[in-house]
Image: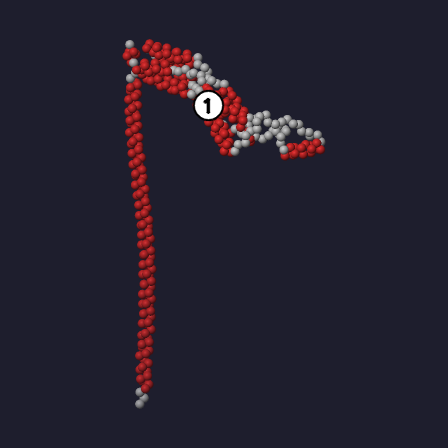
Amino acid sequence: MQDSPPSASASTSPRRFLHRLATPAAAGVAALVLLLAWQWYDTRTQSSTLREDVARQMRESEADSRDARLAARQTQEALREAQAKLAQLELKLGESQERQIALDTLYQELSRNREEWVLAEIEQMLTIASQQLQLAGSVQGALLALQAADARLARSPRPQFLPLRKVFARDIERLKSAPGTDLAEIAAKLDQLAAGVDALPLAQDARPRTASESGAVQNQEGFWARLADELLTELKQLVRIQNLDRAEPVLLAPTQVFFLRENLKLRLLNARLALLARDDATFRGDLKAARDWLERHFDARSRATAAAIGTLSRLGAANAGVAVPSIAESLAAVRAYKATPQRRER
C-alpha cells in the first residue's frame, strides 16, 4: 500500500493555506498598529498644542489682568489726585472769593468819598517816605513824597485842605535845608566794598618788583654785553633784595586769610549799621579800621585795593551823625484830619 504520499501532500496544503492567510493578516495588523500609533501621536501632538495654546492664552489673560489692575490703580490714583487738586482749587476759589468780597467792600467804602481815597493814598505815601527817611536817611525821597502829596491837595478846590498844605510846606522847607549827605548812597558803596573783599589780592602774595619794573636800563650793546647782562639777571634770580616802603606784610595761613576777609566784611557791615543808626563815632572807627587792614594786609599796588582805600577815605569824610529831619508833623496832620470828619463838613 502506498499511502504516504497522499498524507504528505495533505499536510503541506494546510500550511500553505495558513501561510497564505497569515501574510494578509499580519499586514492588516501592522497597518492597524501603524494607524493606531499615528492616531496616538497625532492626538498627543494635538493635546500638546492645545495645552500650549491654553497656557499661552492663560498667560496673556494674566498679563491683561495685571495690566487692567495696574490701569485701575493708576486710574484710582489719578482720581484721588484730581480730587485733591479739585479740593485745593475749591479752597483757593473760596479764598479768592473772600478776598474779592473784601476788596469789593473796601472799594465801596473808599469810593463813597473821593477825598477819603486821596487822603488814604497820601497817608500811605507819607508813611513809606517816613520809614525810608528814618531807616535810610532818604531826604530826597521824602521831599518828593511831600511835594506829590501837596500837588494832590492843590488840585482839590476844598479850602479845608489849606491847613494840611501849610504843614506840608513847613516840612518841605525843613527837608530842603537839610544837609546833603546821601546815606543810601553811602550804604550802597559799603555793600559794594564788602562784596568785593574776596577779590582783593593780599600783600603776602604780591610779587617783588623786577629790575624792568623799577626802571633799570639794560645794556644791550654787543654780544658780550648781552651775555653778561643775562648772566647777571640769572644771578639776581637766586637772591632778591627788595626795599619796602612800609612794614613787611604778615604771613598768614589760609584759615587766617579767610578770617581776615570775613572780619573785614564785618567791619564794613558794622559801619553800614552805624551809618543807618546815625552813630558817627562807630561809623568812622569801623571805616578807619577797615582802611588800616587794607593798607597793612592787602596789596596796595593793586587797582582794586587802591580804589577800595580811596573809597573808604572819601566815605570817612561824610558825617553819619547828621540829624535827619522828620515828616512826622505832616503824617500826624493827615491822620488827625481823617479822624475828625466834622471839621471837614464845616
To which quarter of the image does residue 94 belong?
top left
**Residue 35, placed above or below residue 287:** below
**Residue 34, placed above or below residue 307:** below
Q: How many marks?
A: 1
Give the residue drawn at x 32%, y 86%. 4
To which quarter of the image does residue 21 belong?
bottom left
Q: Nearer the viewer, residue 113 or 275?
A: 275
209 vs 253, left or right, is right
Q: Residue 205's spot in the image, x, y percent?
A: 55, 31
Give the residue drawn at x 44%, y 16%. 322
- Helix, strand or loop status at disc 1: helix
* Residue 22 seen: yes
Q: Residue 262's spot in the image, x, y percent?
A: 47, 29
Q: Nearer the viewer, residue 130 or 263?
A: 263
Q: Nearer the viewer, residue 123 or 193?
A: 193
User: What residue does disc 1 label?
Assistant: 271
**Residue 208, placed above or below residue 315:** below
Q: Quadrant of the N terminus?
A: bottom left
